[in-house]
Image: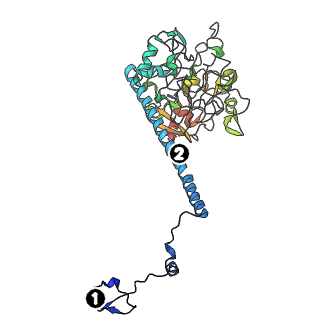
Amino acid sequence: MNTASPRNLSLPVGQTSQGVLMFASTPLPEHARSRRSPKRLNRQAFSLVELVVVIAILAALAGLLLPAVQAAREATRRMNCNNNFKMLGLALHNYHAAYNNFPYSRIVNDTNWRGYGPVVGMLPFMEQQAAWEMISHPHTSDSGNQYVAFGGFPWTADYTPNRIQIPSLRCPSDPAENETIGRLNYGFCYGDAARYISFYWFHPDQNRSDPAYDWLGDEAVDRGMFTWNKRKRFRDCKDGTSQTMLMGEMATFLDDRSIIGTAAVFDDRQFQTDLQQCASTYDPERPQFYKPGQELIGFGNFAGQSNRGRWWTDPIACNTAVNTIFAPNRVSCTYSTGPGSDWYGGVYTVTSRHPGGAHILMTDGSIKFVTDSIDSATKGVDSNTTVTRYAPGPVHPAGSESPFGVWGALGTSSSQETRANEAEL
């Protein structure tokens, strides 16, 4: 009996062994196999056309996503800026709770005639005790110079506090940096006035018969919650704390001619009462920049002087003040004839590097975002003449309605304008 396995049988196709149908085990020829399975060939790479299509799709997706990423980053920076303002508002409220008033706009003593700005008094309420101790007690700078308590001039880079960078004073959207300048992105509101807002002019012989050199200065500029040599209280905010601006944002100098980062310079004070001189300083062909030939703080003879947010210790209005004359992100103008003559005031516009507007801090502590298109003029009111007691043409005395629309009304503290309620904030 044959015991061979069926696998070893070589039977013709169709024949059986022991009743089992068997198929031929002879392998197919090579040419037959290649005709049966042409799709089994492996592909090793994309074609050039397919690669170009993939790259184009990725580029389109990146183009769609990048603006969204940038917008998300700016939204985060704007939120952090808002939080900084909340901290400053809380510090001001705590200061008021401790002393029953807000800080002086300018603190002057015998050792420092230029003085210090409001931020210095706020330091203990901002968790900046170390900086406060350095200013309020004698200290030695890195170079070995010794400074007495509240001594040294704010424009001296050797004065150590001037180099302290306080994060809560900086807007994350403002990229300006300098190791010798402790910058400030949040200015104190002086209302809707421009003339003498940070200094009283002293006549040489104190002759009060000449109104242009009244030794008491222009009292009509006392329009906002901050003013020269006074400490305001909540009770001084008669327009309502939710309708009165306390601080406003300001972009700082980037070594360019951008209208939001610096100020035009005038060697006389006429622009403070004839605002068209200030308003016409921008370049019509490049509206975001000052026109060629216009002198600016930070350039030429005015390099190294006060500038927008230059030092948080400095009380000079160009450094630490804002007013509500021009709508946000317009030009600013200041008076100066050289170093040391920059304290007479000017037009210091609220500016920021956020698209479309800027933050402001209201007296009640709330934060608002004001758009560039806010109403800053009123029909029937001469908006060309700033609020002042001594000025050619129309005069708007203290307590009068602001000539600068809803925006001006937000800056005044006791003019009782109902227009402040019209602000869409």
For residue 71, above or below residue 160: below
**Distance from Cα at disc 2 to Cα at disc 1:** 85 Å
Which disc is residue 2 wearing? 1
Helix, strand or loop at label 2? It is helix
Given the image, on which type of amino acid does mark 1 rest? Asn
- In this view, the residue in front, 286 or 385, is 286
Query: Which numbered mark, 2 or 1, is in the foreground of this view?
Result: 1
Farthest right residue in view: 293
Q: Residue furthest left?
A: 1
Observer-nearest of 399 and 102: 102
Left-right relation of 215 to 170 = right
Q: Position of residue 314 (x, y in %)?
A: 54, 20
Crowding near pointer 2: few (<14 within 10 Å), some, many (20+)? Answer: few
Asked whether 16 or 353 is in front, the reply is: 16
Q: Position of residue 416 (x, y in %)?
A: 50, 31
Q: Position of residue 155 (x, y in %)?
A: 57, 17
Mark 1 closeness class: few <14, some 14–19, many ≥20 residues within 10 Å: few
- Residue 332 visible at all: yes
178 relative position to 21: left or right: right
Question: Is label 2 in contact with label 1 (beta carbons under 8 Å)?
Answer: no
Q: Quadrant of the N terminus?
A: bottom left
Check disc 2 and report the residue beneath it: 70
Which quarter of the figure has residue 259? top right
Q: Earlier in the sequence, mark 2 or mark 1?
A: 1
Front residue of 414 and 127? 127
Point out the residue furthest to the top here. 205
